[in-house]
Amino acid sequence: MTKTLITRVYKMGEYKWRERGYDYQLADTQLPTAEQVEEAGRAFRDYGLKAEQTPTNHGTSTLPRPHPLRSCP
């Protein structure tokens, strides 16, 4: 492993579950706070691992629109 990317964007695929009629079991899960994301990164770095965070403006929408050129099988 060369690096770990810590992201708050775990809900981006939620729309795919809904489109297929599946129950998205993480729907009620809160996004982590900026402090929690920083704490996770610090935990990786404490073990000498490279950890980067995604920009905090990502993950604010629970149902993003899919890319118009990308099909979702």
Image (spheres, rainbow, N blue to C red):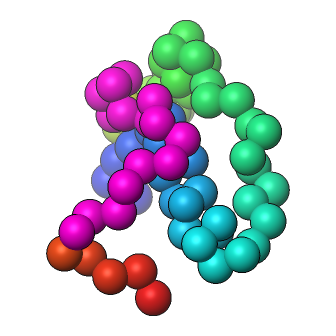
Q: Quadrant of the N terminus?
A: bottom left
> What residue appears at the point 75 percent right and 37 percent down from the top-left corner?
29
Which quadrant of the figure has residue 21? bottom right
Q: Position of residue 39 (x, y in %)?
A: 57, 18
Point out the residue furthest to the top here: 35
Compared with 66, 8 (above or below) is above
> What residue appears at the point 64 percent right and 79 percent down from the top-left corner?
20
Compared with 62, 73 (above or below) is below
Q: Nearer the viewer, residue 33 or 73?
A: 73
* 4 relative to 67 in the view: left or right: right
> Any magenta on residue 28?
no
Asked if residue 48 shows in the view, the reply is: no
> What residue appears at the point 53 percent right and 23 percent down from the top-left corner?
37
Q: Nearer the viewer, residue 2 or 53?
A: 53
Point out the residue furthest to the left here: 69
Compared with 31, 27 (above or below) is below
